[in-house]
Image (cartoon, grey):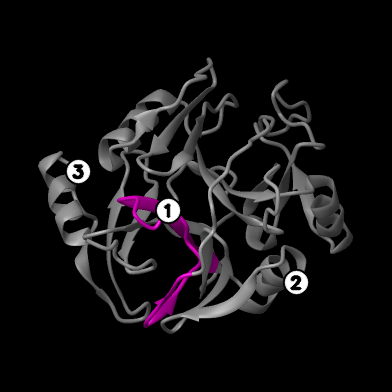
Amino acid sequence: MWHRFGMAVAVVIAAPVSAQLSNLAAPVVISHYELNVTSVAEHQRFWVDTLGGKATKIGKVDAVEFPDALILLRERKPTGPTRGTTFDHIGMAVPDVPAVTTKVVANGYKLTVGREPAPGETASPPTAGNYGRFSYLVGPDGVKVELVTNMDAGAPPIKGHHVHFVNKEFVAMQQWFMKAFDATLRDGQTDFFIGADLPGVGYSLNFFSWLPNEKLTGTHGRVVESAGFDVHDLKAFCDRLKAKGIALTKPYARDKALGLYTATITDPWGTVIELTEGLRPAPKR
């Protein structure tokens, strides 16, 4: 899987938080991931020292900042890794996948594959990976990250790229996310993969089938607690979700720790999605 894209990165500073998020006018963007972590320090070694993010705070919450992705670190022991949940991995883009992968391994972290083998098996499906163009990493507490190749001239050393879900009912899952976020079907559907793109953003959401005979669980309590999306006019967006029959699992309210208005929805398979307003400035009118 090789990706070429050309989104400009803008540095955004907005009190009381700041985040480098592009597509400032898009109604919804992938913005952050909330992690339950055994040790903030160990995760900073992975996300900052190894992958090159910047340690920061979002309100009172420890975070690591990349262009187009924030990693929020909540120090509470996770109930398990990303493996076995409906959230497969955090997608990041780098100009030189082999170089970053070599550094990851040298720092003591392991590699894995895209479509993982069934429990007790060692052989992966034939689409498992091409480690020259992309690779899959396993960080502390079993958090899974994919690196894809960014071929843009002047590309940053690393940036957020996509969020990737996994489900036996991968098409139904994709359709739920299209409904929730007004996303559009991406060309290139196969018998094991389908994509959806956020309006004004492009390449955003990926969905794989899950071949092994293993029951998947939702994300609550796991190392990746939730995938996060920043929304302009979050209150109105929540009202539209309710009109679509999508209930909020955490109401629209100000999160005192983050210093932002947030809400939460959960898909029918237990994937927690946090919605925020204010990680990027409101569009000019």
Disc 3 is placed on an element classified as loop
Q: Which residue is mark 2?
A: 49
Q: Nearer the viewer, mark 1 or mark 3?
A: 1
User: Mark 3 = which residue?
Assistant: 246
Check disc 2 and give the amino acid type.
Asp
Left or right of residue 187: residue 151: right
Camera-side residue: 57 or 6? 6
Q: Which residues are magenta?
A: 12-36
Q: Is residue 35 magenta?
A: yes
Q: Is residue 19 left or right of residue 25?
A: right
Observer able to see residue 29: yes
Q: Is residue 138 left or right of residue 15?
A: right
In the image, is residue 199 part of the stretch drawn in magenta? no
Where is residue 253? Give x, y as percent. Answer: 21, 70
Q: Amino acid at mark 1?
A: Asn
Instruction: Confirm or deny contact between disc 3 and disc 2 (CB under 8 A).
Output: no
Element at badge 1? loop
Which label is found at residue 23? 1
Q: Secondary structure at mark 2?
A: helix
Q: Is residue 73 above or below residue 220?
A: below
Q: Nearer the viewer, residue 47 or 281?
A: 281
Label 1 – label 3 distance at C-alpha: 25 Å
